[in-house]
Image (cartoon, grey):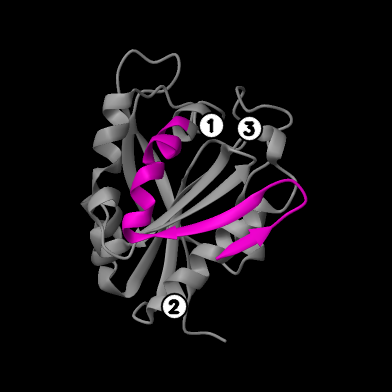
């Protein structure tokens, strides 16, 4: 499957076809998540550990943005039941079965290629894949929670929440987890709050 934008080609890979592109995903994650709001100071070793559940998951999807022969963006998804436990547990505590959810993990895109609708294509293609599997009631994802008036927040920062809402996702303030990483400027890993969003996949 292929979707063409004015600047890039957005292509969808599933299952084993994902594997040759994982180095590109990790490269982009380390580059883009250094930006606010994640400020991620990651390493290749941490990336390999983080990506392992995704590598092993059946039903995974990878959406890539190609500009010529260069990968400039990546977006991943997998069944929530195959994700790390810390992403499942908040839903279990709230009385839901993780097997009913498809998990949208990261979306990362080099700044020069933003503004062409690639983020929306990432959302749409992951949702189409989740629906095609026919076994999931909901899609879910999560994002880091930062103070609204934080001094380090860039003046030109644009939250992705507007895109999420326009794609039919709603926040679940009652469903949160914590994820640890070393932030730029920190000397050790600290836990960050991650809030979930969700959308029904059973609606027309």
Q: Could you say which is closer to the camera, residue 19 or residue 102?
A: 19
Residue annotated with mark 1 = 32
Q: For the residue labelled by badge 1, is the local secondary structure a helix, a strand or a loop?
A: helix
Magenta segment range? 1-27
Viewer-nearest of discs 1 and 2: 2
Gap in angstroms between the C-alphas marked 2 and 3: 41 Å
Q: Residues within 10 Å of mark 3 (few under 14, many from 20)?
A: few
- Residue 117, image quadrant: bottom right
Q: For the residue labelled by badge 3, is the local secondary structure a helix, a strand or a loop?
A: loop
| Image x and y of residue 151, in percent | 62, 23
Q: For the residue labelled by badge 2, is the local secondary structure a helix, a strand or a loop?
A: helix
| Image x and y of residue 183, in percent | 41, 23
Q: Verify whether residue 131 appears in magenta.
A: no
Relative horizontal placement of residue 170, taking residue 149 as reference (left or right) = left
Relative horizontal placement of residue 1, taking residue 111 as reference (left or right) = left
Gap in angstroms between the C-alphas marked 1 and 2: 29 Å
Q: Could you say which is closer to the camera, residue 149 or residue 119?
A: 119
Residue shown at 46% from the left, 34% from the top: 29
Nearest to N terminus: mark 1 or mark 3: 1
Relative horizontal placement of residue 116, taking residue 147 as reference (left or right) = right
Marks 1,2: beta carbons within 8 A? no
Extreme residue toward the right, this view: 6
Residue annotated with mark 2 = 132
Residue annotated with mark 3 = 149
Residue shown at 64% from the left, 61% from the top: 3
Q: Verify whether residue 17 appears in magenta.
A: yes
Residue 145 in view: yes
Residue shown at 55% from the left, 66% from the top: 1
């Amino acid at each position: 499957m292929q979707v063409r934008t004015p600047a890039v080609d957005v292509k969808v890979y599933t299952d084993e076809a994902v594997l040759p592109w994982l180095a590109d995903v990790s490269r982009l994650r380390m580059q883009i998540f250094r930006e606010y709001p994640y400020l991620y100071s990651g390493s290749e070793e941490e990336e390999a550990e983080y990506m392992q559940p995704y590598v092993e998951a059946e039903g995974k999807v990878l959406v890539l943005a190609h500009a010529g022969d260069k990968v400039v963006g990546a977006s991943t998804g997998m069944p929530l039941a195959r994700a790390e436990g810390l992403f499942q547990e908040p839903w279990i505590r709230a009385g839901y079965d993780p097997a009913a959810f498809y998990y949208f993990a990261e979306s990362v895109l080099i700044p020069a290629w933003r503004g062409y609708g690639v983020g929306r294509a990432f959302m749409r293609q992951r949702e189409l894949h989740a629906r095609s599997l026919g076994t999931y009631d909901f899609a879910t994802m999560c994002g880091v929670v930062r103070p609204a008036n934080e001094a380090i927040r860039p003046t030109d920062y644009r939250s992705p929440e507007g895109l999420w809402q326009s794609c039919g996702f709603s926040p679940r303030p009652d469903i949160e987890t914590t994820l640890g990483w070393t932030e730029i400027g920190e000397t050790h890993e600290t836990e960050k709050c991650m809030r979930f969003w969700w959308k029904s996949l059973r609606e027309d």
